[in-house]
Image (cartoon, rainbow, N blue to C red):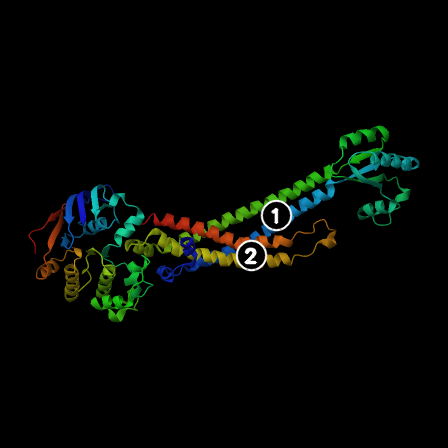
Amino acid sequence: MIEFQDVAHGYGGGRLLSDMTLSLPPGSFHFLTGPSGAGKSTFLKLCYGELSPVAGRISVFGQTIAGMSRDDIARLRRRIGVVHQDCQFLDHLPLAENVALPLTVSNRAANPTELDELLAWVGLSGQAASLPPSLSGGERQRAALARAVITSPEVLLADEPTGNLDWEMSLRLLTLLVELNRMGTAILVATHDMNLIRAAKAQVSARVLRIRGGQVQVAGAEL
Amino acid sequence: MKRRLAWLTGDARADRVVPPTGAPARLTLLTSAAMAFLAVFALTLSLATGRLAERWSQALADGATIRISAPPEQMAAQTKVVLDILAVTPGVASARALDPAETRALLAPWFGPDLPVESLPIPALVELREDAAGLDAEGLRLRLAAEVPGAVFDDHARWRRPLVEAAGRLRALGLVSLALIGGVAAAMVTLAARAALAANGQVIRVLRLIGARDAYIARAFVRRFTLRALAGAAAGTLAGMVAVALLPNADAAGGFLTGLGLSGTGWLWPLAIPPFAAIVAFWATRAAAFRTLREVQ
């Protein structure tokens, strides 16, 4: 589904990530961990084409990103759900419209019933008309998750999705991710929260990738 | 065709995606109105000077004058010789000597109406009209020089050329002004669009990240600026046309500069300004939008 072949990336001439060769198969659940600044967000951005590798080849759904046109990249992103670290909402639109945006930009209308069900699934039924700035950190993270899955993506990338959440809310979000994975969505969660990874042990079979010294390593046996 | 029209008919949901663009959009509206107002005058100038050039050219082209300077006692005889020559000259449709009253009328603007023409040594004037074939001006000059040495043939070319040239230059200036106005309008819309795009950098980034194509994002801005340019230009054009319609009639000033406004089908030309402004705004905004979008991954 997502394959890295000898991929390297860096900023300002230096190499942040190098020699990355790995594969994320359909339906898998992966955690990507490492200290702050190790390159977790960079890794995710490489997956959906926001960044381009300085070396190597990345293919997603069988297509090499390097050769894609901007329109092809846009179409690729409709098949990938992304929960950004800072959520990335349009503050002038109500929550429901923000959640439905991936459908709107592909000229599809959201089914109101399905949208209500989706907001209920993330526990935001009563917030459909709220503007993003009025939401709490936890609500924003769950809304970001709802937006990421509204197009039924084949893979979900989440960048520190529990970064602003308390432990109870983190577990709730983890449960939602596990539910998605059980429905067949491949999940990749970048986090430095080892407690979250340990909590996932009880719910799902997941692999942990660790970024160390600019390289991605498998951290150990399946959790 | 349907896709092209979609740029203007728009999509209510897509429009909401980009927040109101405020000052840049208002600037586009005002700039378009002002530019359209100026464009009406440049167009009017261009059309009117074109008409003037044509009128002056036609009025003077088929006429000529022969001036006869001779002692008073020979004046009648020499005038008759000139008329006889003209009667057998190919290309002359008609010829007649101006009587003293007509000569007085010609000189009245300079010397007043009470000029005693008969008592002054004023040359006699013979007015002639050419037929469609035209006459051989040089041949006529040579014959007059041989038979009536005091007669000078004037085919008006000396007067006509600078007048027609001046009118032509004015017309060209009007067209250049129109081009400049179009260019400035495009530049202003581009600046306004770029300001709006820069102010919405985060919105554009989010839209790209969730799978919006460049055309979808650009459309929201392009439609907004195109419609504002159209509305502003329509208002400016209307105001300009009213102002032209209210131009004072210059007939009283002697008819030399009459017809400086619009007339007949000329009133249709300014109606092309609003759609032209919309087209300029469309391409200027589209180019600015795609240039900005290329900077966003």
Q: Residue furthest bottom?
A: A126
Dots 2 and 1: beta carbons under 8 Å? no
Q: Secondary structure at mark 1?
A: helix
Q: Amino acid at mark 1?
A: Ser
Alpha-carbon distance for marks 2 and 1? 16 Å
Image position of B70 (left or right of A13): right
x%, y% of residue B167?
65, 44
Question: Which of the chains bears the disc numbered 1?
Answer: B
Residue drawn where x is 35% and y is 54% of the image: B216
Both labels 2 and 1 in a single chain: yes
Residue drawn where x is 64% and y is 54% of the image: B264
Question: Which of the chains bears the disc numbered 2?
Answer: B
Residue drawn where x is 46% and y is 52% of the image: B281
x%, y% of residue A32?
15, 53
Observer-nearest of A114 and A218? A114
Q: Which residue is mark 1?
A: B46
Image position of B267 (left or right of A179): right
Q: Secondary structure at mark 2?
A: helix
Neighbours of disc 2 within 10 Å: few (<14), some (14-19), many (20+): many
* Label annotation for residue B237: 2
Which tag, 2 or 1, sits closer to the chain's start?
Answer: 1
Q: Amino acid at mark 2?
A: Thr
Neighbours of disc 1 within 10 Å: few (<14), some (14-19), many (20+): many
The mark total stands at 2
Residue B53 image-quadrant placement: top right
* Label annotation for residue A81: none
x%, y% of residue A92?
34, 63
Residue B27 in view, yes or no: no
x%, y% of residue A66?
25, 43
